[in-house]
Amino acid sequence: MSIAKHVYRSGPYKDVYAQAVKVGNCLHIAGQVGVGANGKPGTSLAEQVQLAYANIQYVLSKFDATAANIVDETWFVTDMAELNQEMKASFAARSEFYGPSPEVAQTVVEVRALIMPSLKIEIKCVAQL
């Protein structure tokens, strides 16, 4: 059985990597990292959170969606102790994206490493359109 998919690809690895896949009214957004348009990661965890959400917003815009459409997210962090130290600033960046009372299920997982050694976080989301 074939499933109808709308796939969005961009960036230098677009031949092998999809930024998002829409199936029905469900949009699966691949993990977005804290790298700016200049290709450089933010220096702090909170700055990387902010950049990751900017990248998520860009992908959402390709589907005429916003942060309000997100129902689930997973944060992959490389250092839970650093997250605890920067909790206030990191969650302030999250509140900038969603508003003060996000209606989003969230999971936070510590991982050993991400694709670039300087990355501290990757955020993966599911949105309902």
Image (cartoon, rainbow, N blue to C red):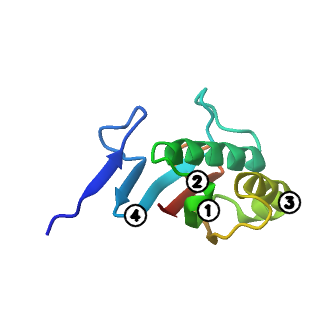
Q: CA distance from mark 4 to mark 3?
A: 33 Å
Q: Quadrant of residue 112?
A: bottom right
Dot placed on the residue nearer the N-terminal end, 3 or 1: 1
* Amino acid marked by disc 4: Asn
Tell me the quarter of the image containing the N terminus: bottom left
Q: Amino acid at mark 1?
A: Trp
**What label does residue 88 carry, if any?**
3
Q: Which mark is residue 75?
A: 1
Name the residue furthest top. Answer: 38
Residues at discs 1 and 2 in contact (Cβ within 8 Å):
yes
Mark 2 crowdedness (10 Å alpha carbons): few <14, some 14-19, many ≥20: many
Residue at horizontal 80 percent and vertical 62 percent from the top: 100
Please tell me the numbered disc located at residue 122: 2
Which is more foreground, mark 4 or mark 1? 4
Is residue 92 visible in the rendered structure shown here? yes
- Horizontally, residue 15 falls left or right of residue 86, namely left
- Do the CB atoms of the residues marked 3 and 1 lie less than 8 Å apart? no
N-terminal of the pair, mark 2 or mark 4, is: 4
| Mark 4 lies on residue | 25
Percent of width and height locating residue 41: 65, 37
| Residue at (75, 39) in percent of width and height | 43
**If you read the primary sequence from the N terminus, does the residue marked by circle 4 or circle 3 appear first?**
4
Q: Where does the image place residue 106, in percent across and percent down from the top left?
A: 63, 71
| Comes first in the chain, label 4 or label 1 | 4
Q: CA distance from mark 4 to mark 1?
A: 23 Å
Q: Are circles 2 and 4 on residues that touch, CB within 8 Å? A: no
The answer to which of marks 1 and 2 sits earlier in the sequence is 1
- Looking at this view, is 110 or 88 the one in front? 88
The residue under label 3 is which amino acid type? Lys
Residue 115: in sight, yes or no?
Answer: no
Structural crowding at the residue carrying mark 4, measured as other residues with C-alpha within 10 Å and reported as few (<14), some (14–19) or many (≥20): few
